[in-house]
Amino acid sequence: MAWTSEIVMLSPRDSLIDVLIELLKRMGFMEYEKVPRRGEWGLDIIALRKDPIAGTEKVIIALHEKGLADSRRVNQFGELLDEHRADKGVFVSPAGFTKDAKLLLSREYRGRIVPWDGDKLASLLNNYSVPVPEDIERILEEREEVNHQEETLREFNLDAPLLYEFSPEEILKGVARYLSSNYPIEPDEVELSGLRVKLQSAYIISWAVDDENKGRAVVFSRDKIVLRADEDAELSNPIRKARLDSPAVIRATERELEVPLTPGEAVLVLKETAAKELGTSENKVQISDRRKVYVPKEAELEFKIGANRGTALVKLPKGKVEASIEPLPEKYFVEKAREAVMKATGEGIKGKGVKITKKKKKVLVSGTTERFSFEAAFNPYTGKLLRLDTRMSEEAVKKLLAESYPGSEILGVEFNKKSAVADLLTGDTVVSVAIDLSNGETREVARFPSLKGAVEKGKSIIEENFPVNGLSLSSYRVVEHKYLELELSGEDGMARVRIDGSTGDVLDYYVEISEKRAGELVLEKYPGYEIASVSDEGDEYLVDAANETHEIKVRLSKDGKMMEEIDRILRRKLAEKIAEEKAREVDPEAKVDSIELAKDWVVTFTGVSKVGKLVLHRATGEIVEKEAYFTERALEEFYHRHVREKYGEENPRTERLTHYKDKGYVHIKVSGKDRLYYARIDTRSGGILKEDSVSAKGLTARLKQMNLEREYR
């Protein structure tokens, strides 16, 4: 169906905006967005397009659907251009523009506002092959159906007005509502194909007995008379209207008239009834007016619902509906499925292997063609095709690709619900192809740069920026049908390089050097060392190396760019040598008892005069901590010398020496010729912290001696 200005004008607002967005897409706009309207004069779409000369162009679009657009509306759109800082505006008015609006556009907004009327928009939509949406097609079909229904009905001129309204449209709506509530049928699917109406004549008669007893009656038949119809809730308004109306014209395909009474008989029946009810003679019942009317009694409808037919009986004037419709035969659905599948795929159904499944609100027809499997869902009563799912088989997809790209290699096919995307190697180029599984149509979604060129570009970027050389292609794959991922490898390591399929540029990469290359890089920085081990720790390598004096541990990133020395220690032989030298500095005759590596080197030693512990820096051997204590023998000799020099004792003798290691001192008791000597000596420095002496004889001396024994015990 081609677009016309009439179709544009009949299109609903929301549908037409969607059509405009599709048109912008086909005109090359890269971005487009609906804008929620604020008030009556807002805009509807903002779109962006790249201009090779001017750069990015911003365009706004507004739709004016109510009649001709005037100059006031044009000016309001011009203000929106400034408000949104747009380069250009498209003002769509399907009905066209007033003369003053056209003049304003040509003078004030030339080049900034582009006016599209219905003819211009229809022309553009046809030029860019924008299809008429299904919802707009339905509106056009419904309009044609209404016109067809109007042509189906004939007009009948009656010789009197109707007592009750008669509308074919309202009767059809009532039948449609009834059918939609009892069957899976939409009200707008019910189409009138015939209407037979039955009318019965009746009479409105004005009567009076006296001033108090009078009124208007409706005589339907001998058995049905409403004497005071003007006071009846259901009849008062209809008879008032009917008395003023002209003879009616009704629309139907056929009409039937029933005449229960002649006008004279109607008067006779009324007078008899009135006289009886009022208890008076017929002579006193005076008739002042008589008006014939027609009463719609029932309507028989012939209706069409899609491919089905049915009848309904409507009791009037209440509108009670009696209707039924039978499902269409299975043969119909099979034939319609064949037509739908042929239209969608171009292939006929294979053999007679068609399966029919009946459900409450639909009939399913399933089967296969040469390349497709299908399932069609139909409304069982209207025959309307509700859904058609066709799916090309995997084997057919691969065969189609082989035919479309002869000599190509299928790298992989990703099957989704309604489509598949295949990656193919054609010559030296990778191509991503989308396949519509419903009909087998194909389109290229990406064509990557040549594989050789991609490898050279990836190889050069990696080798120029990372410490790896000699890389060559080991494998490749297509990611998300948009990126080409290469894996390059060599003795120095490997790299994964991701190439953007649309530009051919490197999008991302990952580099991992080999363990051997990791060792080589460490040796380049630490000449004279030898590699002891290389361990893989996930995101990094740990490299152990050593020379004659030191052992080191180096952290190296997998890409080979980040190197950090995380540990350095003296080799054990060197540490032992330094430990001996440092111990002799404390005591020239000291010997190392043990040396262990903790955080630093921990050394214990024993000398003639001193014992203790040294902590040497793990890498330099410098003393970090020193603990040295005099030996008990050294302290004893020191104190003997002290007693000789200070007190003149010639032959002092030690009677007791107690070592308090936790407190860092000793208590010593020495006897001389006539005195006893007590002292507390610091084991670190050898200094006398406290000293006392007492005579060895006498009672007083004995008491003092007891106190000193307790103090220097």
Image: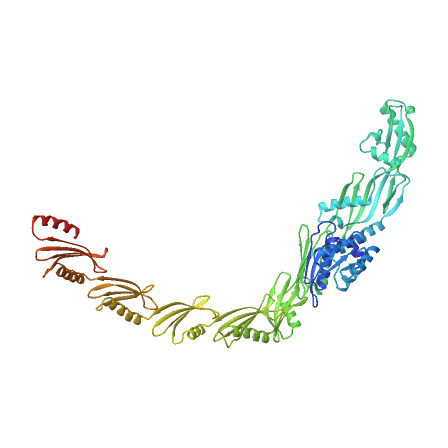
Q: Would you say residue 581 is visible in this rendering?
A: yes
* Side of 685 relative to 458 (left or right): left
Q: Position of residue 402 (x, y in %)?
A: 64, 72
Against 343, residue 40 (above or below) is: above
Nearer-the-camera pick, 426 or 538 = 538
Q: Would you say residue 96 is visible in this rendering?
A: no
Nearer-the-camera pick, 361 or 497 = 497
The residue that appears at 34% across and 73% down in the rendered structure is 549
Q: Quadrant of residue 279?
A: top right
* Side of 620 relative to 424 (left or right): left
Q: Position of residue 128 (x, y in %)?
A: 75, 64
Q: Residue furthest bottom?
A: 470
Q: Quadrant of the N terminus?
A: bottom right
Q: Position of residue 35 (x, y in %)?
A: 69, 54
Q: Position of residue 300 (x, y in %)?
A: 81, 44
Q: Residue furthest left?
A: 698
Nearer-the-camera pick, 597 or 696 = 696
* Side of 453 relative to 151 (left or right): left
